[in-house]
Image (cartoon, grey):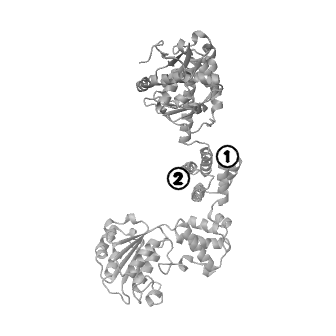
Amino acid sequence: MNNMQNLSLKYRPKNYDDLVGQSAVSKSLKYALDSKNIANAYLFSGLRGSGKTSSARILAKALNCERGISSKPCGMCASCVSNDGIDIYELDAASNRGIDSIQDLIENTKYAPLHSRFKIFIIDEVHMLTREAFNALLKTLEEPPSHVKFILATTDVHKLPATILSRVLHFRFKKIPLQDIVSRMEFILANEQIPYEKEALTLIARSGGGSLRDSLTLLEQGIIYSQRKLNKESIALMLGLIEPNIIKQFFADVLSSNDNGIFRFLELAKSYEASVVIDEMSSFLKDSFANKNPNFSLILYDRFFHILAKAKNMTKISDDDEFILYILAFMLKDATKLKSIDEDLKVENTNKNEQDYLNFVTMIAKRDYKLGEIFKECASFVSFDGSEFCIKINPKNEEDKQYFKQYYTSVVKNVFASIFNDAKLVLISDLTKQNVKNEAIKEENNYPKINNTNFENNSSKNLKQEFQNNYNTYEEEIKYPEYQSDDFLDSNMAFEDEDNIYEIPDDILEQYEPELQNILFESLVKIKIENDTLELHVMPPYNEKEKAILRDNIKNVLAKCSAFFKTKNAKIINAELDKKKLH
């Protein structure tokens, strides 16, 4: 059993290759020793048990090795074999912190080493020295005798005066990674021929907090407690920790809102300190994040870590651990139900856009009952990104299609512009196959291409139901003629019951540029042939640019239509200005 005592001393590093978790420090010191680039004073700072004192002793032996200065002391000469080392002096500043101790040290530096190359002074916990002691040490530290080297070590470098820091070569020892500590313990247990579970070593290393010495001390305790059979159950019980599988099941219950499972965990957690439970939860979440656990999203990690941080602070101001754990569990459960800000904004914007669409359809219905019926039965809202308002519409028969086309500009366009100002109205419709173009409500009139005519709006059913309720409010009012607004109509546009009414032929329309095609599509109301005379009924566009383009080309269009229908005479009818010719 004696072999199991003092593992930290038994397996203390003998050279820099054995130093665990401090590769940067080891590499720097090895290069300095091999190149004989030796400083007068060194400062090693870092967490307890991170290798500062071990590094100081290795450096001292490397400097005084009888075979010469090297990064690998021989380990066989008198200087290397000696436990304390010849001409190596160690001072514990925690118990020798006064100016008297430092004056004795300074006096000792005046004498040459007895047998070695250098007289080396190792001052541990140097930050404990008094201000007077530091001041007394300054001159000697800056310009020591050629045979003297200083190695200072501290766990709290911030307490050292700046005058000391400026006179030493500073090496910072980092917290040893958990995996490096586990690997070192595996090496030790393999040498000691002790069986173990790696999960048990992980618990020990995590409790060691990055300190190899603390971890090895806990390992010795675990060997004794588990009777030389290290397993995660016994180690968790020894350390007062909850088993990782229990923590894992707790978070599974939180994600699934399993109240029974959550209360079972809380009942079990009463036997543990709240701070320990919170630390175990944090470790589980960190491991889950590192392993990319698919059960947790980034927003859940963010919320859970914030909740654990708040609970950790609560342990500092309250002794009621049970209350803290209950609050923690309820907050974690509620966090799984909250939506992200992006999701809330998306829902809010969607609801607002759908309401705008309902208002749009309602205003159309007030202007034209039949057109409102077409939108009600054949149209649905698709999307609105702030610049393009997209609607899917497919009239169910030819009559509705022609009616929609006839009043698209005079009603739909005007109503849309009154609600959405400079936004663009984009139509998704099978009518695009018949040269029905998308409409843009803006000066340039750029018409986007439709790439998808099979868009399915998931909310169309709810939208139509809401519209039906809204529509019923106006239906009775709209059906009466005295409430039917017809300010956008005149006698030249009421052709539904007349014969000899035609549209502009596709063969003629396709001869023009897309911009002119769009203008003709929205401006040419109907072509009427009567007494061998072709009448081209035109609704002039509101845009001056479009009106100019139409004026320059309308006579050519008239001639081609007359030739196509083989009429002797042809004339242009302005549908807005009581059959006056367009100039």
Type of amino acid under label 2:
Lys
Instruction: List x then y, in percent, for residue 319.
Output: 57, 52
Question: Nearer the observer, disc 1 or disc 2?
Answer: 1
Instruction: List x then y, in percent, for residue 87.
Output: 39, 85
Q: Is residue 34 above or below residue 202?
A: below
Mark 2, Cα crowd under 10 Å, few <14 / some 14-19 / many 20+, is few
Circle 1/circle 2 CB separation < 8 Å: no
Quick one: quadrant of the N terminus? Answer: bottom right
Q: Is residue 419 visible?
A: no
Disc 1 is placed on an element classified as: loop
Residue 71 lies in what quarter of the image? bottom left
In the orientation shown, which residue stands out farthest toward the top? Answer: 482
Q: Is residue 26 left or right of residue 110?
A: right
Type of amino acid under label 1:
Ser
Residue 257 disc label: 1
Q: Nearer the viewer, residue 10 or 303?
A: 303
Instruction: List x then y, in percent, for residue 524.
Output: 51, 22
Residue 316 disc label: 2
Q: Nearer the viewer, residue 346 or 19?
A: 346
Q: Is residue 40 left or right of residue 288?
A: left
Disc 2 is placed on an element classified as: helix
Q: Earlier in the sequence, mark 1 or mark 2?
A: 1
Mark 1, Cα crowd under 10 Å, few <14 / some 14-19 / many 20+, is some
Residue 218 lies in what quarter of the image? bottom right
Q: Is residue 137 above or below residue 239?
A: below
Residue 391 lies in what quarter of the image? top right
Q: Is residue 120 left or right of residue 257?
A: left
Residue 99 disc label: none
Quick one: quadrant of the C terminus? Answer: top left
Q: Is residue 8 visible?
A: yes
Q: Is residue 342 above or below residue 525?
A: below
Question: Could you give the CA–CA distance between mark 1 and mark 2, rounded to whole angstroms?
Answer: 29 Å
